[in-house]
Amino acid sequence: MKVLISSAFFLGLVALGSTHLCLVFPQQRGNVTGLDAAAAPDCYRVTGPCGGMDTAGHVRTVFQEGDMVSITYQKNAGHWVAATPGYFAISLIKLSNHGGTLSAPQELKRREDKNEPNLTIFSDAVQLPAGVHGHHIIQVTYVTNNPAAPAVFYQCADVTINTRTGGGVVG
Ligand SMILES: *[C@@H]1O[C@H](CO)[C@@H](O)[C@H](O)[C@H]1NC(C)=O
Ligand SMILES: *[C@@H]1O[C@H](CO)[C@@H](O)[C@H](O)[C@H]1NC(C)=O
């Protein structure tokens, strides 16, 4: 009997629906509005690699190779499932041919979804690899592992990584 009740409870939770993810810093492509309320449309992007915002965007942020940088993102709306908790991942993607070609994402950090409330902001420090420079994407994904929600949420931010000697080039 106890088992039946828990299953019903579990199914009820799963049926609630969608998750949302926003990338605050560096700022995601497109707009980033509505962060004060769960389920903001700008935080609902569910096709890879950039949630449909797949045209190389405006570079707003400049980093240096090898630096520790703080990436800030918001679990705008979450649906954690106890049996299969999901995770957030921060990855680096290199653009070449003026953004026409993207390298495979290089994962820099992963954080488990621990059922934090909606609108929780995370800031995770990641170390940029040495020897990479030029136009890159900081990609944050929210892998839900929740059968009732989209599998993965995507956000991308355009950044330039300069060489340590200061000879960095945009592009
Ligand atoms: C961003 O917001 C402005 C003003 O509401 C709107 O005109 C524009 O289309 C939006 N851009 C995107 C990519 O959603
Ligand atoms: C989180 O937001 C979603 C979408 O608005 C909502 O369905 C859900 O109940 C919220 N969860 C909590 C714990 O408030």
Image (tube, grey):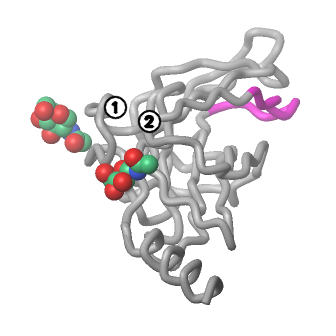
**Nearest the eye: 161 or 30:** 30
Which residue is outermost to the top?
166
Identify which amino acid the numbered label 2 is placed on: Leu
Give the vertical position of 81 relative to 112 (above or below): below
* Between marks 1 and 2 in the image, the one whose residue lies nearer the viewer: 2
Query: Mark 1 touching mark 2, by CB under 8 A?
Result: yes
* Quarter of image, res 165: top right
Image position, residue 12 (x, y; %): 42, 74
Q: Is residue 55 visible?
A: no
Question: Which span is picked out in magenta?
Answer: 125-134
Residue on which disc 1 sits: 35
Q: Amino acid at mark 1?
A: Leu
Q: Residue at x 60, y 26 (%)?
A: 160
Q: Which residue is found at the position 74% from the left and 9% from the top? A: 166
Q: Would you say 171 lies left or right of 42 here? A: right
Q: Within 10 angstroms of label 2, few (less than 14), some, or many (20 or more) residues?
A: many
Q: On the image, which quarter does residue 46 sit in?
A: bottom left
Q: Compared to 164, does 153 lie above or below?
A: below
Q: Which mark is residue 91?
A: none
Label total for image: 2
Foreground of the two, 4 or 72: 4
Question: Residue 141 location, x and y as percent?
Answer: 58, 53
Q: Is residue 131 left or right of residue 48?
A: right
**Secondary structure found at label 2:** loop
The residue indicated by pointer 2 is 119
